[in-house]
Amino acid sequence: MSKTGAHGFKGRASVISGVICALLVTVLATTTARAELPAEESEAWSLREESGATRIYTMDQDDSSFQVFKAETLLDAPIEAVMAIMADPASCMEWVLNCSASYSVGKGDFNDRYVYSVNDMPWPVTDRDYVLHIRTQGDETSGEITMKMSATPDKRAKNSNRVRVDRSSTFYRLIPEDGKTRMIWLQHTDPNGSLPGWLVNTLLVDIPMSSMEALERLSGLERYQGFQLIYNQDGQLIDVRKPADT
C-alpha cells in the first residue's frame, strides 16, 4: 500500500480526493445483478462535461445517494486492439487507476471467465480486491460487442489485509466506426464505507474521462496491434487473437 503524506488543508483535500477516486475506480469493472442500469437513451441523463469526442452524463439512481454515470467517446483505435486489451487481465494495471495486480482465476474462456484484481489505495485506506465474472458477447453482422461483469465475492477466499468489493453495476458497449471504436460505458457504484454521496458524485466525471484516455493510449502500443476478432459459424464472437495464434 502506498503511503501519501498531507501537509495543511490543501494536502489533506488532495489525499481525500485521491482516496475516493481510488475507491470508485476499484469497482470500475465490478457489477452485481441487484441493480438495473438506466436505459442508454433515457431522457433523464444530464450532460456534465463534453471534451472533444467525449461526453459524460449523470443521473440520480433510485434508493441510492450515489449517481449513475454514462460515458460516450470515439476511441482513435480499432476495436480489435481495444478487445485485445479487454481480454488481457494484466492490462488493468496500465489503464485502470491504482490497479496493482490482475490475473485470471479458475477455468473459463473468452466469453465467460473470472478475473481477480487488487487496487492499491492511498494510505491509510485498506487496499481493495475483487473477483469479476466477465461475460462478453459480439455479433459479426453488426460488429457490436458488449461486456457485462458481475462481482462474485465468494469465488475466492478473502484476504485479511484487503477489503472485498461486491457492489456496483457496469456495462460496456463497443461499436466499430471506420477503424475507430465508439465506447459507451454505464456504471452505478455504491462504494463500501461511509463516503457521502454528494462528494462521490463530484468525481464521476474524472473517472471515466481519465480511464478512457488511458485506454486509447494503451491501444496504440505495438503489442496490441495485428489482432483479429474470431467468430464461430453462427457469427458469434468467441475470441480475439493474432493470426499466428490460430
Image (cartoon, grey):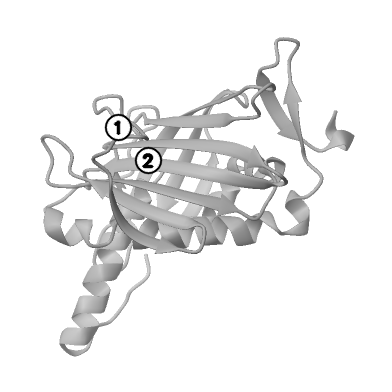
Q: Quadrant of residue 195?
A: bottom left
Against 133, residue 100 (above or below) is: below
Could you tell me residue 234's position as x and y percent? 70, 10
Q: Which mark is residue 186?
A: 2
Give residue 37's mark: 1
Q: Residue at x 33, y 31 (%)?
A: 39
Residue at horizontal 62 percent and vertical 45 percent from the top:
181
Front-lying residue, 54 or 80: 54
Say if 142 sits above or below 126 in the image. above
Report the residue at 30% width, 68% height from top: 18
Q: Residue furthest top?
A: 234
Residue 139's image quarter? top right
Q: Who is closer to the viewer here, 217 or 167?
A: 217
Q: Residue 180 versus residue 166: which sits nearer the camera? A: 180
Q: Residue furthest right?
A: 244
Q: From the viewer's perspective, is 42 left or right of 225?
A: left
Q: Considering the numbered disc 1 on the image, is that residue within a helix, a strand or a loop?
A: loop
Q: Is residue 99 left or right of residue 45?
A: right
Q: Label 2 vs label 1: CA separation? A: 7 Å
Residue 54 placement (x, y as % from top left): 47, 57
User: Circles 2 and 1: CB distance less than 8 Å?
Assistant: yes
The residue that appears at 45% across and 48% down in the rendered structure is 72
In this rendering, the answer to whether 201 lies above or below 59 is: below
Q: Which numbered disc, 2 or 1, marks the residue that appears first in the sequence?
A: 1
- Nearest the viewer among 114 and 227 is 227
Instruction: Give the amino acid at mark 1.
Output: Leu
Screen quadrant of the C terminus = top right
Residue 94 visible within the image: no
